[in-house]
Amino acid sequence: MFMFMTSEITLAISLGLASIIWVEIVRDLYHALAHIWSPIYRLHVWHHRVFRPDLTVANPEIYRQAHWYNDVPEAMVMIVASVLPWFLAKQLHWEYDWVGLSGSFYTLSFLLSAIARGFGVPRMDELTDLTHRPGPFAEIPGPWLVNRTYHWRHHFDNQNAYFCGILTLVDRFLGTAVSLKGKTIAVTGASGALGNSLLKQLHMAGAKPIALTSSNSPVVLDLPTGKISLETINWKVGAENELVNLLSRVDILVLNHGINVRRARNAQAIESSFEINSFSSWRLMEIFLSTVKTNRDIACKELWVNTSEAEVGPAISPLYELSKRTIGDLVTLRRLDAPCVVRKMILGPFKSKLNPVGVMTAPWVASAIVNLVQRDFRDVIVTINPLTYVLFPIREFFVSSYFRLTTRAD
Ligand SMILES: [Zn+2]
Ligand SMILES: [Zn+2]
């Protein structure tokens, strides 16, 4: 009897939650549709006329009108769709089918607050319109829940991305959770196989890539439309400070340079492994993080670090593993309070100068990286080793928890 009760309650809670997630998915799909179908866009565009870049309201009259033209119709569509979970539960002749209407009551609260804002009820915007409040951003874009920083990008970074209102599921599914369009992206290790492929993929995703390399020749992309020469900056390990001005104008910095001394174990091999793989990356990371100053920087700047699969497994090269684990742990430590999004790229072996026997190819790995970033994976794992997909998140969880508990932000 007790078991029966427990499973009934679990089922009822699941149906209630599912009905709420369902209406949120409908809201976000309706919003995405509004940006490609002009009859709905004509209503939705009112929402885009309301705000200045600091999220203050440009015109209170337009702010009120926007609720009648955009928020109220959106909530009506959600209410109509919210009947579906209840209808399906009813078809199954389930006693608690009415729990399927949770999404309707949930949506009703949005409808009523939109109507109240439409009538200009005082303070209603402060209490109910949380993703459009002005002021400095206190958080980086939320990975699963839409916060002000996340939604700001829909208005002022790219209107054809960041469609979600509460949960980020639909953007993650559509690949619109991170837009690379128009972003200035600098990639180190640009002359290597992955660096070159990544620059090409970023270019094809609409970004403005910059190549950072220790080699003297300009980096060239071989595109289907012909070859193009990229803006190429020559830099040397140890001279990271010379890149301050460049990093101030860069939206996304990709740390991808590295060395693999393989079987060597002398003092020189230790020094160059740590200097190149760990400390030059760490210095660039600190310089880049110090350039995050404005609301736009907090919303749009990102740091991606290629820490490699060596963080959790052998690479048959001890000094490569040690130095890559060092930078991996430093990233885990510093991203506890980083002012912008910091991603790790956990890559399995691919064919390159460092590894002539890799199974995956650099172009394939690069396109997978871009695909996963657009779905806002903060840890971008691309490998053929299934163990990494299990071990890395467990290790990252425990190491970051340990660092969080035993250290403090200034
Ligand atoms: Zn908005
Ligand atoms: Zn929109």
Image (spheres, rainbow, N blue to C red):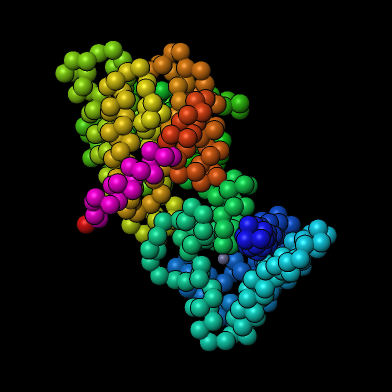
Q: Is residue 44 left or right of residue 288?
A: right
Residue 172 seen in the current view: yes
Residue nearest the viewer, comparing 264 with 255 = 264
Give the quarter of the figure containing the C terminus: bottom left
Residue 327 x/y as whole percent: 30, 35
Residue 24 x/y as whole percent: 64, 61
Q: Is residue 7 left or right of residue 380?
A: right
Residue stretch in magenta: 393-409
Q: Residue at x 40, y 60 (%)?
A: 139
Query: Could you tell me how many numbered marks the image carries?
Result: 0
- Say above or below: 188 vs 62: above
Q: Residue at x 61, y 26 (%)?
A: 224
Residue nearest the viewer, comparing 280 with 50 = 280
Q: Residue at x 44, y 71 (%)?
A: 134
Give the quarter of the figure containing the N terminus: bottom right
Dominant SS of magenta comes to helix
Residue nearest the viewer, comparing 88 with 298 = 88
Q: Residue at x 54, y 82 (%)?
A: 124
- Say above or below: 376 vs 275: below
Residue 338 x/y as whole percent: 33, 51
Q: Is residue 322 left or right of residue 251?
A: left
- Say above or below: 110 vs 350: below
Res 247 quadrant in image: top left
Residue 203 seen in the current view: no
Res 128 quadrant in image: bottom right
